[in-house]
Image (cartoon, rainbow, N blue to C red):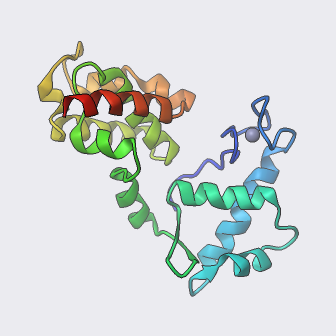
Amino acid sequence: MPRFSYPCPDCRTTNSLHELDCRFEGTAWPTIEKAYTDCLSVLATSQTPVTESALREAVHGEWGELHKAALSTLQAVSRVEQDDDGTLRLLTAAEYKELVSEPTIEPMRTIYEHGSVPGCHDNAVFAMIAWYEMVDLSWAETKATVCEWLRESGAWDRGGFEESSPEELVESKRHVYEAGYGWKQAGREAKAVIDRQR
Ligand SMILES: [Zn+2]
């Protein structure tokens, strides 16, 4: 299983200090971590895909809002996949890595496929780094993946960068990874610019 930081399903904190308006305010982080590991341990040890109701029953203790939210987060970040028949399956480490390297949800898909264009480089690179941080790639993996994307999507050749290499550019944005910023806002802004130039 790749690294997973067990963020609060609402505010994404990874300690016991929640955002002011978080609906799990006051929940100690070990409790949050446990909600995830409850779900993951059932999914990881089951020989066959399990339905959500089977999962609820298999989770010892109470299945509550926190478990439900933790499961939704696991699905949102593609750790867990739900088939058409409703069964849940934990992706293998290799499947997961392949999947998250190529974002399939908007606005990330547009940014990934078309690459950044002058006028949105800051937001596009910010969003890509924040995305890979969210899906729990290490910094080294994030940097390598974003550099590869800058080259292969044609973004780097379009120019408009102050830095002399993709590596230098991505390194200068390491704070985005470390602060754990969200990708949605920057992603939306970057996509709007890309869409206008397509
Ligand atoms: Zn929270």
Residue visible at 27% across and 28% down? 167
The correct choice, above or below, for 109 with respect to 146 in the image is below
Q: In the drawing, does residue 115 fall left or right of residue 135?
A: left
Residue 181 vertical placement versus 134 (above, below): above
Q: Residue at x 56, y 60 (%)?
A: 75
Question: Residue 184: percent from the left, percent from the top?
Answer: 49, 35
Furthest-front residue in view? 196
| Quarter of the rendering occupied by the C terminus | top left
Task: Measuring from the top left, give residue 116's x and y in whole percent.
Answer: 25, 31
* Numbered label tally: 0
Q: Residue furthest left?
A: 157
Q: Is residue 40 above or below residue 121?
A: below
Image location (x, y in percent) of residue 166: 24, 27
Residue 144 seen anywhere in this rendered image of the structure: no
Res 157 seen here: yes
Q: Return the residue nearer the eye: 155 or 139.
A: 155
Q: Residue at the spot x=76%, y=51% of the render?
A: 32
Query: Regarding ligand 1, which quadrant of the image does it lie in?
Result: top right
For the point 83% across and 38% down, the residue is: 25
Residue 12 pos. (x, y %): 66, 40
Question: In the picture, residue 179 is in which quadrant?
Answer: top right
In the rendered view, does 160 fall on the left or right side of 35? left
Could you say which is closer to the camera, residue 70 or residue 144? 70
